[in-house]
Amino acid sequence: MKEKDCEAMLNKARNYESQATATVAGQEFIEKAADKLREAGDCYFKFKNYKSAIKCYSEARERHKKLNYTVSVAMDSEGIAQCHHSLGNTEGFKKFIEEAAEIYANQGEKMTMAGNLVSAALLYSEAAIAYKVLSNSDAFRNCFELAAKNYLEYGGMLLEEKDYGYAAANLGWASMCYFAISNIDDAIKNSERALKICKNNNILDDNYELATLSKAICDRVLQTATQSFNKIKDNLSESEVKIVKKCLQSFE
């Protein structure tokens, strides 16, 4: 990828906007434009063109706000925050990363109330990581606690439904959330439960690798953790990758 590709992304966003109308289809074009603007922002950020990146992220954020795509607004704000951080603008960084953290936490609560427990857990984990950057240790710990509880509740539901592989995966994620806040006892307990479920039900797929990853993290066995992570990371969401990386940071 070259920096000129960033401009191509920006032009694509403008093209989408030119096709927007007052119809539902028009809203779809605005959504495509907003997403492409963020993609252009990511591109400019990669090439350290932070001012152009801020412009793209800000335009994406404005359009996502109009569409009421709240989580997307948080993602745009994170992009703006990282640009300000790279430019040494502490005030701008704190403003936008705090906005993102609050949105993630609020949306996590809404998803929990709606019964969408995994989405809630991921949103809480995003909030936790953002609060960690802000050195808000209480909010960091609280959000990862809430993420772990959502994973555990959903894992329990899956066990009742005899969906053992996915249940083990959710227990593994709960374990890593606990590990991230140094709740080692609960981290170990849930990683061991996850592996036991896999063993008892002959599960050897990605769910087993995730359970193995959580146990290796708890045991601080970097080589095993890295091997398991590398096997499954292409199938993980960006938020899930962040959880793993946050745990692995403690090995450094």
Image (cartoon, helix red, strand yellow):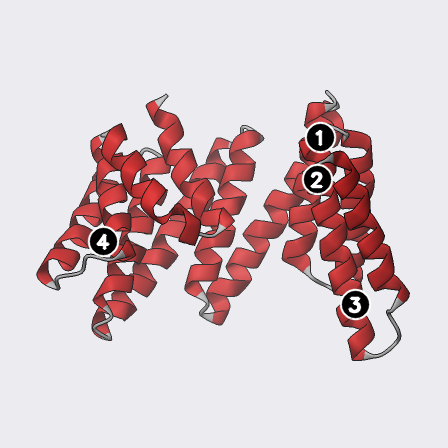
Mark pair 1, 4: CA separation: 38 Å
Note whether 32 is above or below 93 in the view shown. below
Mark pair 2, 3: CA separation: 21 Å
Residue type at the position of mark 4: Tyr
- In the picture, the quarter occupied by the C terminus is top left
Give the class, few, some or many, for how many residues have Cα within 10 Å of label 1's Cα (few <14, many ≥20).
few
Measuring 70% from the left and 52% from the top, which residue is drawn there? 73
- Residue 163, given in percent of the width and then of the height, sits at 24, 70
- Label 4: element kind: helix
- Residue 197, given in percent of the width and then of the height, sits at 15, 59
**Residue 85 circle label:** none
Q: Mark 4 sits on what residue? A: 208
Quadrant of the image occupied by residue 177:
top left
Q: Earlier in the sequence, mark 4 or mark 2?
A: 2
Q: Mark 3 sits on what residue? A: 29
Q: Mark 2 sits on what residue? A: 43
